[in-house]
Every structure is written in C-alpha cells, then in structure tokens.
Amino acid sequence: MIHSEIFYLFSIISVGYILGNIKIRGFSLDITAMLLVALIAGHFGMVISDNFKLFGLAIFIYAVGLQSGPGFFETIKNEGIKLNILAISLLLSIFVCIYLIGSYFGLSHSVIAGIFTGSLTSVPSLAAAIEVKNDPLISVIFGVVYPFGIFATILFIRILPIIFRVNLQKEVQSYENEKKQKYPLIFTKNFKITNENFKDHPIKKSQVEKLTSTLIERIESVDKCDLDEKDCKQLHFNDIIRVSGTKEQLETLSVMLGAEIGDAYKFHDDMKVLRLLVTSKDIVGKKIASIKELKSLRAIVTKVRRAGIDIAPHPSLALMLGDKLYVVTPQKYRERVTDIIGNNLLKYPAADFLPISLGIVFGILLGSIPFTLPMVGDIKLSFVGGILITALVLGRIGRIGPVVWQLSPHSNTLMKTLGQLIFMASIGTNAGKYLLQGLSENGFLPIYIAIFALIFSLFLIAFICRIFLKMNFLNILGLLSGGMTSTPTLTMANNISESDFPSVSYAAVYPMALVSAIVLSQLLLKLF
C-alpha cells in the first residue's frame, strides 16, 4: 500500500499543507506549497492518476457554483457586461503577447498554440487546438509550460495585494458594506393612528401594507380582537400598530397614519418575537407564501437576514439555508413555529448525496453537448464549464420538489477544501513527471514567453480595474482567476482573502472566458 496512489495523495497533501502554513514575516506559500511538493513527487515517480484530478475538480467546482449561485445572477445583471469585457481583454492581452513574441523568435504556430493553452492551464483549449491541427508538438509545449503557468499565476495572485498595498480585510469589509447598501436596513417601529380621516372610515391593513411596502406585525385595536379575526384586518382611529420596513417606508407610513410613539410601548397580547435560523429541509428553497403552516399558526415573518443583509420578506422570496428569520407568533405556538423553521444547523443533513451526485451528472452531460460558433465550428463547455453552470443554476433555484440542492455550510466547505487539495496534488504530480524531459528538449524560451505574457497581462488588467475603475480587490482577484479559467488561482484568492467573495466574479466570467479561450486557440491555427 506504500506504493499506492492513495498513499501518495495524502502524503503530498500532508507535507504541502504543513509547508504552506509556515509563515516568514507574515508571508506564506499557502496552496503554492502543495503544487511544489506535488511537482517534486511527480518527478520521482509518485504520480496520481487523472481520475483523482477530475474527482477533486468536480466536487470543488460544484461546491463553488452552489455557493455562488444566488449572488451570480445579481452580479451578471448589474456588472456582467463590464466584468466579461475585462475578462476577454485579459485573454486577448495574453494571446497577443504570446503571438507577437513567438513570431519575433520565429516559433511555429503549433509551439505558440502550446504556449497559449499551457499558460492558461486550459485542457479544453488544448483539445480544441489539437482538433484543428493534430500536431504532437502542441501537447509537448503545453506540458512544459503548464506547471510554470500554474505556479506563476498562483504566486502572482498571492503577491498582487502586496504590490498594490491593499489590506484585504478592509476590502472584505468594503465588499460587505457595498452589499448592505443595496438592501437598506429594516426597522421595527410603533405607531398610533391619529389621522382623523380614519375616524369614520377604517382602512384595510393589506391596503396600508401595499401602499407603503411595510409589514404590519401587531395591532392593538380599540375593538379588542385577534390578528386572525376579520375585524383586525382593518385599522381604526387610535389603533396602535407595530410595523417593519425601511426608514423611508416608515416615514411614508407616518405621514399616512400618524405619529410614532416609541419602542417602549407594551402590547397587551401574547405575541412573541422569535429569531430563528432556517435549517429545516422542509422549507429550504421554498417561497415564504408557500409555507402554509406558518399562516395557520398566525406566524408573520417580519424580516429575513441573509449574509449580514436585511431583506424584506416578500411572499415570493425563497428561503435559503442559514437565513435568520424574525418571526412574530403567539406564545402558545412558539415551539411549533420553531420546529417548522428548524433553528438548529446540527439537525440539517450533513451531506445529502443525491443532490450532489445528480448535480454533477447533469453538469457533465451539459458540458458534453456541442454547440456551433461561426468560423470555429463545434465547441463544448467542457467538464468544468458544464458543472459550474449547472451548480450556479441549482444554487439559485434552491430546490426542485423534494430535492434540496443547497448544502450546509460545513458540507460546502468540506467539499471545496477536499476537492482543491486532491486536484492540486494530481495536476502537480502529472506535470512533474515529464518536466525535466520537456525542458531539455524545448529549452526555457516557451516558459519565459508564457510567464511574461501572464504577468504583464494580469498586472495590466489589475491596474486598470483598481486605478481607473476603482473596483473592489476581491472582485479583481475573482475576475483574474475566472478570466484565465484557473481553479488553483481562485483557491489562492479565496485563501488569502479568507472569504468566498472572489468566487462570485469568478463564476460571472468563467463561462465566457472558457469559450473565448477555446475560440482563440482555434483561430490561431485556422487564420494565422
């Protein structure tokens, strides 16, 4: 068993993990150490098969897609065009640099294609190039450049914040604040209806909520009634109400009904305010309006807090695992409401393997479907592209019937960490196996060209994004990783920022970047 791939895999992971966590003056190699250990192990014959690489890549990309899904579509809607233009510009810069320098040194188009695909560490681009021109030299140069392309991009992403003198923790805080600005804080206030227009003509509760976009959660009526009684669906003069809404919404309501009376007022009812965590599999992915059990128990969701952001509880809002709900309900139904919502992450299934396996199967099938582009021909999204797009969509949907696609935070983190470690160990050993042989046969020129094109282009796009476009550095890191379709680079970006925020912009540009890289690799051999 000492000479088995399992032993090699976990030995490389153990040594790489230890070395990656050694800090010298606050600097550590992090995931780069894993790659170095794997390259050395591969040179001495400790090779891990591609099946492990594909397995690690599948679970890592699927976990990233599920987690990024909810934010992905919002990013595409708001900044999608800008991000994708920048990603394509990055690819074009790398392509032009490699082509011009390669042509200057008289390199053949096959060698240039190998340098381009190897610098991007893009197997789909390599396959597309070989499909146009079945020249073994393309694969040889790809194999020579590949490990240096990975190492250079990972290390450059690691030192990029240092070059720009960026405090990543402040960038994380800025990112969170920017998200919060899109969702104004929701407050809860007490009001007394003093508008004399309601003395003789009560107004419907639902009508006030519709006009002001607020939510009336408690009513102390002069007629003494329960919230579920028909008369309490109307608001009367001198009624006291407790209302949730944004600052602007509550100001509008105050103008319509009357003055705020302060939070010290005590309602003479048995209603209690609960703060509950959504952990029940039965309601994850469901819209608030579809949870009939809450309505029957007179429970009103007044606010949803998601990832530190207040979200108005619209009936069409789908609940996600980990959402914190503010719920007003009668005291006697407190335990039943808590059971419906869950409020215990430990009770959520640690790993429901059916959604995981189904999602990956759907992703592989999607990536296998060819589609046609003019002047290029049939191309495919590939293994990674299919799984990523599928996971993004499923992460956004949340659930389909009884199948809940979302994972618990612990399961998602485990999948990402395990996947990236297996993937890095596998690609490192396979690249290290023929590294010295490739260098002796082809020299260092392809490597020099690839590294120059990568560093120049990455710095150029990062400079434009930071200095001219004033982008958050987490979005820049994700954009650069996605623009190169580089999973190891994304891993480094997430690790150094201690967050998953770079994954959102990575996912936003990855599909277009993948297609663009494939197109460029084929156009190089078809048109030039």
Image (cartoon, rainbow, N blue to C red):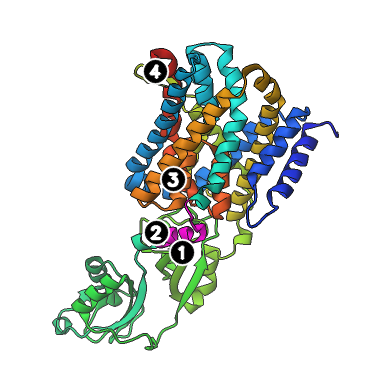
Identify residue type, mark 1.
Answer: Gly
Q: Name the image quarter holding residue 512.
A: top left
Query: Is disc 3 surrounded by few (<14), some (14 to 19) or many (20+) residues within 10 Å?
Result: many
Query: Is disc 1 surrounded by few (<14), some (14 to 19) or many (20+) residues within 10 Å?
Result: few
- Nearer the N terminus, badge 3 or badge 4? 4
SS for dot 4: loop
Q: Is residue 14 left or right of residue 147?
A: right
SS for dot 3: helix
Residue 82 belongs to magenta span: no
List the residue tagged with mark 4. Answer: 376
Label 3 with label 4: CB-CB less than 8 Å: no
Camera-near label (1 vs 2) is 2
Camera-near label (3 vs 1) is 3
Structural distance between the alpha carbons of marks 2 and 3: 14 Å
List the residue tagged with mark 3. Answer: 505
In the image, residue 298 above or below residue 108:
below
Of 223 and 51, the residue lying toward us: 51
- The percent coordinates of residue 111 (x first, y second) are 53, 17
Region of the chain picked out in magenta, as a range: 164-179
List the residue tagged with mark 2. Answer: 179
Q: Name the image quarter holding residue 428.
A: top right
Q: Is residue 385 visible?
A: no
Identify residue type, mark 4.
Answer: Val
The residue that appears at 44% across and 82% down in the rendered structure is 270
List the residue tagged with mark 1. Answer: 308
Structural distance between the alpha carbons of marks 2 and 4: 40 Å
Q: Name the image quarter holding residue 197.
A: bottom left
In the image, residue 496 above or below residue 324:
above
Query: Is disc 2 surrounded by few (<14), some (14 to 19) or many (20+) residues within 10 Å?
Result: some
- The percent coordinates of residue 63 (x first, y second) are 56, 44
